[in-house]
């Protein structure tokens, strides 16, 4: 669509808010309808690139099954009936008042899904403070907890670590697949990796799966799931013993090296080789690359986050990058300072009770994993009402059976969403939410190495009776006697207030529609001025973790205890380009890219159970069973089965995941490394 050739076409800028990469968009509108979406080449984080989810995002906006009006289901009933926003808000406020009166304000929890952003979250937190509940939770624990705590313990906070792939000579992708997930989180990531490879960089993949990038790698280590610390600490030991570490860097910028050396001495490389499934020669080959090729970028994501020792694995990877001197330097791991905003809107916190997770996971920023315990066991106290905004706990939480039981036991469940999700089907009241095209936002998430701020404005009117989420919260607050949130006419007004409160009245939301660079990146500053840790250095031995009662150094652990009954290892959560978690399977042009879920299984297991490509297998864990089509993948770990998440009903991967297996520090569920058994399913005869 060319606006110059067709004067009816208007081009506007926006930011895609589907996956968190915040890709800049150029959006063409014809007569008020969005007709085309392209990447904005002027925005640094995606440089004009977008994925198919961004490309087909107007299909989400105009999807015929969008929720268009509030609906209610009376107690004991099965059918939903439409009702007006007025009646819905009155009903919600009355029910919340009753619960507050009977159980205290902390009996309300609010779950913010990934699609809530800055303004929605500001209003949700403000409402919770006014109401008096500390239990606002979301996807921090589910997505990033171990990484944040592990890196904070090593490098201090608040910092956002990002790999500089473009300038790296060695790129290690450890439990991450940027060809399918968050591909623009550090610039145009797949392109940058490919450009670096073209210019001579080496690519190494450490992953039980054989994903698309493995074909472009010099080395693929199909590690046995759950054994990462064995491999990382073996690399540390070899680097130390062969004097392949960066001694000047270690002496100048780190603390605790002697204690790390003592711990590394105890690592048995042959045992590690056996446990990880990686030949000792290959471990040596990777250690040599890490010790001799500079600079190196070691990137990691959910593969090493969703494990029972996730925080310590992330610590170990941070240590590996530090002892090879690949920190705060071009081509290595660099840090973007996090801008901090006073988004309190001047509202005091009325919450008196501690959050449901704070006693068990005091370092965690939220505690979605504690929701089911709280509802079903009143541990530490009962949650009786839940408002879920732009999220789908039935799909996201481990142990689906228990999640369904907990949601069914609530006195009151309100869901705000675009579509009738499985969580919405369990609700008392469902409210229609909006897409990012129907509301304004402020994009300050640091999923990029350039501190970049951008505002967006609504490009189209909300579909039907849908309302921006922050409007719903403001109107509910007013109904409950909290007028403070009603004074803002639009998103720009909210932002003006936050900029003033944050001492940045120079910022104008209207002039930030195509983004501004907030600050110059300060790479090298930490090396010059010191790290925000107790010692001011990179802490190989974490004094902060000791103080909090946790192990200061990672240790070799196999987090997956297989048995004769469950001899294989299940990894859940493999991504598809077409979907963001449980979203988009109702979007025709996305569904056709991935019409059904498949389990990746190695030829060794396929031969054992006598299954061919495309046939169905049954996977069983201690928690449940799932039937799924098999896809035989050569080159993956021979003991591993990998399945995608986000599918609904009986195909929900979380039926196989236990909720008691959690990272002991962050509480993050161990969606990876689950003992399982698999067998061929006999086709049903006609
Ligand atoms: S990577 Fe895709 S889904 Fe994510 S923000 Fe960019 S265009 Fe949207």
Image (spheres, rainbow, N blue to C red):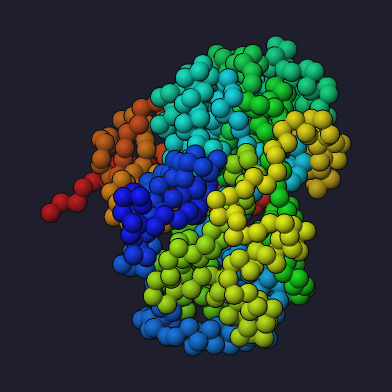
> How far across and down, in percent of the image, does residue 317 sit?
65, 32
Q: Looking at the image, which is closer to me, 69 or 298?
A: 69
**Depicted 585 relative to depicted 125: above or below:** above
Q: Quadrant of residue 185?
A: top right
Q: Quadrant of residue 492?
A: bottom right
- The residue depicted at 40 percent of the width and 31 percent of the height is 212
- The residue depicted at 46 percent of the width and 31 percent of the height is 191
Relative to 334, is 249 on the left or the right?
right
Query: Can residue 408 be spotted in the picture?
Result: no
**Depicted 557 relative to depicted 461: above or below:** above
- The residue depicted at 70 percent of the width and 63 percent of the height is 498
Residue at the limit of the structure toward the top, as seen here: 242
Query: Can residue 94 be spotted in the picture?
Result: yes
Residue at the limit of the structure toward the left, as seen here: 686
Q: Looking at the image, which is closer to me, 129 or 412?
A: 129
Relative to 498, is 471 on the left or the right?
left
Q: Quadrant of residue 529?
A: top right
Q: Looking at the image, which is closer to me, 563 or 593?
A: 593
> How far across and down, in percent of the image, does residue 323 sit?
73, 24
Q: Looking at the image, which is closer to me, 472 or 322?
A: 472
> How far across and down, in percent of the image, does residue 639 sit?
44, 32
- The residue depicted at 49 percent of the width and 21 percent of the height is 197
> How far across and down, in percent of the image, does residue 291 sit?
66, 16
Q: Quadrant of the C terminus?
A: bottom left
């Amino acid at each position: 669509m060319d606006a110059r050739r067709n004067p009816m076409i208007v081009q506007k800028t926006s930011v895609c808010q589907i996956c968190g990469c915040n890709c800049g968009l150029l959006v063409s509108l014809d007569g008020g309808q969005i007709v085309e979406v392209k990447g904005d080449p002027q925005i640094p984080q995606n440089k004009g690139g977008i994925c198919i989810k961004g490309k087909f995002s107007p299909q989400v906006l105009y999807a015929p099954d969008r929720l268009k009006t509030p609906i209610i289901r009376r107690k004991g009933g099965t059918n939903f009936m439409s009702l007006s926003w007025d009646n819905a808000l009155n009903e919600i406020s009355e029910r919340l008042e009753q619960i507050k009166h009977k159980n205290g304000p902390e009996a309300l929890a609010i779950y913010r899904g990934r699609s809530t952003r800055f303004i929605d979250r500001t209003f949700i937190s403000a409402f919770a403070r006014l109401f008096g509940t500390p239990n606002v939770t979301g996807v921090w624990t589910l997505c990033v907890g171990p990484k944040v705590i592990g890196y904070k313990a090593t490098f201090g906070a608040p910092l956002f670590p990002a790999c500089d792939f473009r300038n790296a000579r060695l790129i290690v992708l450890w439990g991450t697949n940027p060809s399918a997930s968050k591909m623009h989180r550090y610039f145009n990531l797949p392109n940058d990796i490919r450009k670096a490879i073209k210019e001579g960089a080496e690519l190494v993949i450490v992953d039980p799966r054989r994903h698309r990038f493995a074909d472009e790698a010099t080395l693929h280590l199909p590690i046995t799931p759950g054994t990462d610390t064995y491999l990382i600490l073996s690399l540390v030991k070899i680097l130390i013993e062969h004097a392949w570490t960066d001694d000047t860097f270690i002496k100048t910028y780190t603390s605790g090296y002697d204690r790390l050396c003592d711990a590394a001495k105890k690592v048995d490389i042959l045992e590690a080789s056996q446990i990880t499934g990686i030949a000792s020669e290959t471990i040596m080959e990777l250690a040599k690359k890490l010790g001799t090729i500079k600079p190196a970028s070691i990137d990691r994501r959910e593969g090493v986050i969703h494990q029972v020792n996730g925080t310590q694995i992330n610590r170990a990877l941070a240590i590996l990058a530090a002892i090879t001197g690949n920190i705060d330097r071009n081509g290595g791991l660099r840090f973007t300072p996090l801008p901090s905003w006073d988004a309190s809107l001047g509202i005091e916190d009325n919450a008196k009770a501690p959050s449901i997770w704070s006693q068990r996971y005091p370092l965690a920023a939220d505690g979605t994993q504690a929701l089911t315990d709280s509802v079903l066991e009143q541990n530490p106290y009962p949650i009786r009402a839940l408002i879920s905004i732009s999220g789908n706990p039935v799909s996201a939480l481990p142990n689906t059976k228990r999640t369904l039981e907990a949601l069914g036991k609530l006195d009151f469940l309100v869901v705000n969403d675009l579509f009738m999700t499985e969580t919405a089907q369990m609700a008392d009241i469902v409210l229609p939410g909006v897409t990012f095209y129907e509301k304004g936002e402020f994009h300050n998430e640091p999923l990029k190495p350039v501190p970049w701020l951008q505002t967006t404005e609504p490009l189209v009117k909300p579909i039907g009776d849908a309302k921006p989420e922050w409007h719903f919260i403001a109107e509910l607050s007013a109904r409950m006697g909290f007028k403070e949130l009603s004074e803002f006419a639009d998103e720009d007004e909210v932002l003006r207030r936050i900029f003033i409160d944050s001492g940045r009245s120079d910022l104008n939301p209207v002039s930030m529609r195509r983004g501004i660079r907030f600050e110059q990146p300060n790479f090298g500053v930490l090396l010059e001025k010191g790290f925000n840790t107790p010692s001011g250095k990179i802490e190989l031995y974490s004094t902060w973790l000791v103080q909090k009662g946790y192990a200061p150094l990672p240790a070799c652990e196999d987090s997956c205890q297989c048995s004769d009954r469950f001899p294989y290892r299940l990894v859940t959560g493999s991504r598809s380009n077409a979907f963001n978690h449980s979203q988009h399977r109702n979007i025709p042009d996305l569904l056709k890219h991935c019409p059904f879920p498949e389990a990746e299984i190695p030829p060794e297991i396929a031969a054992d159970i006598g299954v061919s490509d495309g046939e169905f297998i049954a996977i069983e864990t201690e928690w449940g069973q799932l039937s799924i089509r098999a896809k035989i993948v050569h080159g993956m770990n021979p003991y591993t089965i990998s399945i995608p998440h986000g599918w609904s009903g009986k195909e929900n991967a979380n039926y196989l995941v236990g909720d008691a297996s959690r990272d002991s520090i962050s509480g993050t569920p161990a969606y990876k490394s689950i003992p399982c058994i698999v067998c061929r399913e006999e086709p049903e005869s006609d």
